[in-house]
């Protein structure tokens, strides 16, 4: 269960962990099986799924996804769980849908989805224009492996240390033809039972925007706040690798018109 003290969305996602029929080894019998519970059962299900997704990606691209791409892909394609739309501190982004994740990889190869590993330079924005030809949801996310954040070394007696851990704060926004801007989901650790809202997420290194029944042309923009650094506390300018994902989690239905990177 979340939240993390600074409000980050945890858990990332959830999987079945109760009464899972699994191989056992405690009695040193080769064909011993039994029921077990906990993260020891949920974790290998996700791990096996990641391996299969990496295999599928490698078959198409002859390389493997970065960890940020794997995390972004899983969280971009989850099935809703919880009492309210969006993420929460009990189920995270929801239940993984590995079939949809695999389809997104295939769609990205065919040009019907975006699964890009990019690099954002200091002072740079990246834009991509996509067209949705229907009434399915448009799901846009960015994911990145952030540098290690601050460590509470001064006063270890502080239990709930709420200093923000995020170092490089990237942002994603989506704008439609009418000029309406859509923002990512976020949660509030100080009101942890409340539904997720949409706005400027300043704590997570994964941001996701959901636009239900999307139709028409949308501009996806990736920017950053402040100065990108290689490590916490450094003043040296750096860059940040990230993954951009755009899909409708239904297969096809998206066309990519153009993309460009420009200085801001």
Image: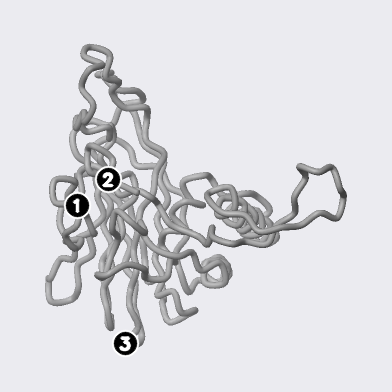
Mark toward the viewer: 2 or 3: 2
Dot 3, how many residues are within 10 Å of its Cα: few (below 14), some (14-19), or many (20+)?
some
Quadrant showing the C terminus? top left
- Dot 2: what SS? loop
| Residue at mark 1 to residue at mark 2: CA–CA distance | 7 Å
Contact between labelled residues 2 and 1, with CB atoms less than 8 Å apart? yes
Helix, strand, or loop for circle 3?
Answer: loop
Q: Name the secondary structure under disc 1.
A: loop
Question: For mark 1, does the 10 Å Cα neighbourhood hold few (<14), some (14 to 19), or many (20 or more) residues?
Answer: some
Q: Is 29 above or below relative to 168?
A: below
**218 or 26: nearer the viewer:** 26
Residue shown at 37% from the left, 30% from the top: 147
Image-quadrant location for residue 242: top left
Is 126 situated above or below 245?
above
**Residue 184 lies in quadrant:** bottom left
- Marks 2 and 3, how far apart in space? 34 Å
**Mark found first going from the N terminus, 1 or 2:** 2
Q: Earlier in the sequence, mark 2 or mark 3?
A: 2
Outermost residue, front direction?
27
- Specify which label sits upstream in the sequence, 1 or 3: 3
Q: Position of residue 183 (x, y in %)?
A: 19, 61
Q: Which residue is mark 1?
A: 192
Q: Is the residue marked by circle 2 packed among few (<14), some (14-19), or many (20+) residues within 10 Å?
A: many
Name which residue lies at 46% across and 69% down.
113
| 182 or 99, nearer to the observer | 99
Q: Nearer the viewer, mark 1 or mark 3?
A: 1
**Residue underneath mark 2:** 3
Label drawn at residue 135:
3
Side of 94 relative to 19 (left or right): left
Q: Is residue 242 left or right of residue 58?
A: left
Q: Quadrant of residue 162?
A: top left
Q: Position of residue 206 (x, y in %)?
A: 34, 50
């Amino acid at each position: 269960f979340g939240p993390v003290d600074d409000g980050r969305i945890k858990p990332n996602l959830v999987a079945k962990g109760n009464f899972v029929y699994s191989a056992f080894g405690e009695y040193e019998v080769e064909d011993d099986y039994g029921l077990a519970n906990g993260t020891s059962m949920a974790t290998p299900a996700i791990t096996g799924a990641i391996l299969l997704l990496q295999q599928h990606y490698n078959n198409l691209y002859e390389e493997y996804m970065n960890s940020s791409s794997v995390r972004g892909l899983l969280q971009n394609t989850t099935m809703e769980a919880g009492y309210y739309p969006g993420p929460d501190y009990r189920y995270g982004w929801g239940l993984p849908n590995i079939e949809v994740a695999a389809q997104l990889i295939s769609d990205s190869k065919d040009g019907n989805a975006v699964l890009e590993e990019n690099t954002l330079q200091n002072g740079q924005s990246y834009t991509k224009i996509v067209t949705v030809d229907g009434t399915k949801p448009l799901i846009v996310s960015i994911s990145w492996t952030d540098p290690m954040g601050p460590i509470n070394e001064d006063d270890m007696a502080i239990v709930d240390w709420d200093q923000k851990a995020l170092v490089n704060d990237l942002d994603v926004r989506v704008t439609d033809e009418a000029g309406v801007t859509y923002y990512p989901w976020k949660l509030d650790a100080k009101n942890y039972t409340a539904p997720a809202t949409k706005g400027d997420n300043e704590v997570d290194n994964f941001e996701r925007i959901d636009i239900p029944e999307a139709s028409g042309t949308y501009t996806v923009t990736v920017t950053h706040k402040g100065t990108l650094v290689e490590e916490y506390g450094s003043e040296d300018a750096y860059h940040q690798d990230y993954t951009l994902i755009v899909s409708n989690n239904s297969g096809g239905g998206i066309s990519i018109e153009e993309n460009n990177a420009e200085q801001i």
